[in-house]
Amino acid sequence: MRTETVALNPFSLMMEPEMVLNAMELSQQLRGLRRHKLHPLDKPLIPYSKAVMDARAAFDAEIDAAFEADGVDEAIEKYFRN
C-alpha cells in the first residue's frame, strides 16, 4: 500500500469540507491536544474571604450614602474629582 502526502491548499480546503475533516483526523498535533471544557458561570477559582466581602460592602455603602446625602449630580462630580 502506498501512502501519498498531499500538500493541502488552504483555499481549496475552504471549498471542500470533507478534505478539512480528513486532514483534521490525520493531524498528530490536533490529536495531541488536551480537551478541557470551560464553563464561564462556574464558581470562581479564588473564593473571596469575609474581609474582602466586608470591604466591598463598606465601599458600596459609602457610595450609596454619598448619593443619598449630596444628590446624584454632586456625588458624581465628587467621585470624578477624586
Image: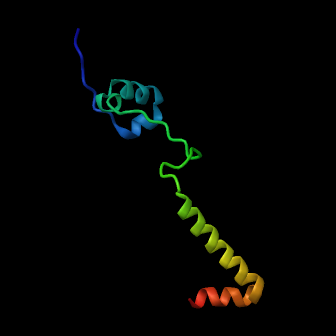
Q: Quadrant of residue 13?
A: top left
Position of 63 relative to 6 (above/below): below
Residue 5, image x, y percentages: 25, 25
Horizontally, residue 70 falls left or right of residue 59, namely right
Q: Residue furthest top?
A: 1
Residue 29, image x, y percentages: 30, 32
Front residue of 39/18: it is: 39
Front residue of 32/25: it is: 32
Residue 57, image x, y percentages: 64, 68
Q: Quadrant of residue 82?
A: bottom right
Position of 19 relative to 75 (above/below): above
| Quadrant of the image containing the N terminus | top left
Front residue of 81/12: it is: 81
Horizontally, residue 57 falls left or right of residue 6, namely right
Position of 50 relative to 29 (above/below): below
Residue 41, image x, y percentages: 59, 46
Horizontally, residue 82 falls left or right of residue 1, namely right
Residue beneath the point at 34% across and 37% down: 9
Horizontally, residue 27 falls left or right of residue 40, namely left
Residue beneath the point at 60% across and 65% down: 54
